[in-house]
Amino acid sequence: MKQEFELEAPKALSLPEIDENVFNKLMAHVLASRKEILDQWVEPFQAAVKELRLDVRLPGGGRDWEQIEKNRKKTEVLAGEFAKQLRGKIGPEFLLAIRAYAFAIAPRQISDTAKSQLLAALGFSVNTSAVKQATVTKKNFDSALAKLRTVANIVNDPQLSKNTYLLDGQQSDQLNLLNLGKIGRVSLTQLSSGAATLIHQFASIDMACGQLLADKKFTNLVLIVDEGDAFLHLAWQQRYIDYLDKTVARLKKRFEVVQVLVATHSPVLMSDFPRDCIYLLDGKSWIEDLLEDSTLPKPPESFGAPLDTVVQNVGQAGTMGVFSARIIKRTVEEILAGRSVSRERIEMIGDPVIRRQLDKKLQENILSEASI
């Protein structure tokens, strides 16, 4: 990436954020299973939640919404205290276990059996008959916890206390072998969306060509790129053809023949091609061109030409927006008709030639009126 794109960005591991909602759910699971849990430290939380539920009832049977909001904030504090005590019970693997729990409960509603198995796995003393066969939820928990332990070892943080870790090449390769899925994601960091798009596009081309070569049936390559520069900033458009040229140069070492077709509306890209390599599409079908015995037209200038020339000759469009053109045309008509036009209106015109000519004509009008 550094050699081809002159970019350097480290890879990072991103883990799902653990927030108070996870602990709210866990606390709700624990309190809903209170009859099955033997841990005495849970009882004060059971009493506190029961009291909060009573507070929201009005004498007429309605609900006190102001009190409900207060209770929501109290519940957040309660969940924090619950998390602190649970951390003391679980020990150093506290966050690993919570991350595995959050992963296991994420996809769907879970059964009471699955809840009991998860709570037992988190270290709660559960008073229920043992279920010999682990539920899918429990298997997901065990699998996630095993992977998270490996992740913790790779990033050298036994507690996985952060949500993001910068990686070196070896760590990135090790994590990619784990197939983390929704447990975590390895991605490039400190790249703009344009840079990331370019790297993804050219990396995809490289991988697709690698698959063709592995088939050992293909020796020639036709690479068709349709609007590959779409949504790129102008600065990235200026680099696009250079990147494409470097990519093609590398592909020529692997294929006998490489031909590239690029479709674009960008005058910046057009200015990177010689006129003999550009064909202007006229909107006609191939059968219309065949019957008319016509060939696609070529622009008079393109390679290294000024952008306004490229826009006119290759893009076959004006160099000014319709709105600004309409305002300038109206200004010209008003000046020619001898009407008063403010200096600010002329000064805002960006084209120095148009601005100078309009200013000159305006001064002539003023002098003519003064002489009368």
Image (tube, rainbow, N blue to C red):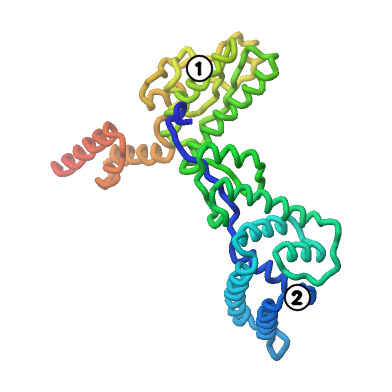
- Mark 2, residue position: 38
234 with respect to 292 (left or right) = left
Q: Counting other residues with Cα less than 10 Å from the Cα at mark 1, is it few (<14), some (14-19), or many (20 or more)?
A: few
Could you say whether the residue bearing mark 2 is in a helix, strand or loop? loop
The amino acid beneath tag 2 is Leu
The residue pinned by badge 1 equals 249
To which quarter of the image does residue 304 belong?
A: top left
Quadrant location of the C terminus? top left
**Of label 2 and label 1, which has the lower sequence position?**
2
Residue 301, position in %: x, y? Answer: 40, 17
Callout 2–callout 1 Cβ contact below 8 Å: no
Percent x, y of residue 308: 38, 27
Q: Nearer the viewer, residue 101 or 349?
A: 101
- The mark tally for this picture is 2
Residue 84 seen: yes
Q: Which residue corresponds to the image point at 60% horizontal and 8% vertical from the top-left? A: 293
90 above or below 310? below
Q: Position of residue 224 (x, y in %)?
A: 59, 22
